[in-house]
Image (cartoon, rainbow, N blue to C red):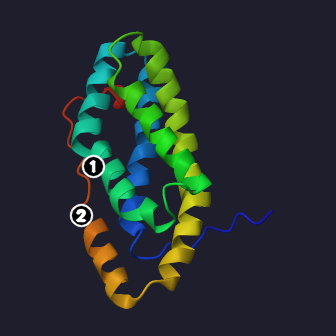
């Protein structure tokens, strides 16, 4: 099996950078559990991350990227279903430990799926687009780099 990283088209690179921060979210939740941080404290960060970053990321993917394959494409259907599942885990107000545990596991699975399968198919579609449409897509997906300036760095065990 060839695990050579796929060269990401520049139009999708902002979303791949976002995915890096999503993987860090899972790591931070794991570190919070390892350091026996109160679940409410971890959840405050998760809510902040959702409102300042992840919700917008999902919206950009759903508006600009997924339609390139069509919402009935099996990979897109899976991604949309996983987006809804992750949103439910983030916004649920009960059983924080269970939801945070599931979120920590499922966000990594989701990101790996998008990066390895969905984006590969999307890149093939972008190759077929005309340059004007590609430029529009790049403009819509380009956004300021996420700044993780959350004050309570519970994951650092300070």
Residue 133 vertical position relative to residue 25 in the rendered view, above or below = below
Q: Residues within 10 Å of mark 2 (few under 14, many from 20)?
A: few
Which of pointers 1 and 2 indicates the residue nearer the eye?
Answer: 1
Q: How far across and how far down the image is residue 114, in percent?
A: 54, 54
Secondary element at image label 2: loop
Q: Nearer the viewer, residue 8 or 39?
A: 8
Residue 88 vertical position relative to residue 53 in the rendered view, above or below = above
Q: How far across and how far down the image is residue 44, in percent?
A: 26, 24
* Residue at image point 40% right, 38% down: 25
Identify the disc placed on residue 24.
Answer: none
The quadrant where residue 83 appears = top left
Q: Is residue 62 left or right of residue 143?
A: right
* Residue at image point 68% right, 68% down: 4
Q: How far across and how far down the image is residue 16, in percent?
A: 43, 60
Q: Nearer the viewer, residue 99 or 124?
A: 124
* Residue at image point 58% right, 67% down: 120
Secondary element at image label 1: helix
Q: How far across and how far down the image is residue 97, in percent?
A: 45, 14
Q: Is residue 129 left or right of residue 113?
A: left
- Do the residues under discs 1 and 2 have CB atoms within 8 angstroms? yes
Residue linked to disc 2: 143
Q: Quadrant of the N terminus?
A: bottom right
In the displayed orientation, state which residue is furthest to the right. Answer: 1
Q: Is residue 100 left or right of residue 47?
A: right
Residue linked to disc 1: 56
Residue 20 vertical position relative to residue 127 in the rendered view, above or below = above
Residue 66 vertical position relative to residue 158 in the rendered view, above or below = below
Q: Nearer the viewer, residue 92 or 62?
A: 62
The quadrant where residue 41 appears = top left
């Amino acid at each position: 099996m060839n695990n050579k990283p796929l060269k990401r088209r520049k139009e999708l690179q902002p979303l791949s950078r976002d995915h890096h921060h999503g993987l860090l979210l899972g790591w931070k939740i794991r570190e919070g559990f390892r350091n026996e941080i109160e679940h409410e404290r971890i959840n405050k960060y998760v809510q902040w991350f959702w409102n300042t970053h992840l919700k917008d990321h999902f919206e950009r993917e759903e508006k600009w990227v997924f339609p390139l394959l069509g919402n009935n494409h099996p990979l897109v259907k899976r991604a949309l279903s996983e987006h809804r599942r992750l949103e439910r885990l983030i916004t649920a107000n009960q059983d924080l430990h269970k939801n945070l545990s599931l979120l920590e596991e499922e966000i990594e699975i989701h990101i790996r799926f998008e990066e390895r399968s969905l984006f590969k198919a999307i890149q093939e579609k972008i190759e077929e687009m005309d340059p004007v449409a590609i430029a529009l897509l790049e403009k819509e997906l380009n956004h300021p780099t996420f700044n993780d300036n959350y004050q309570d760095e519970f994951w650092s065990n300070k």
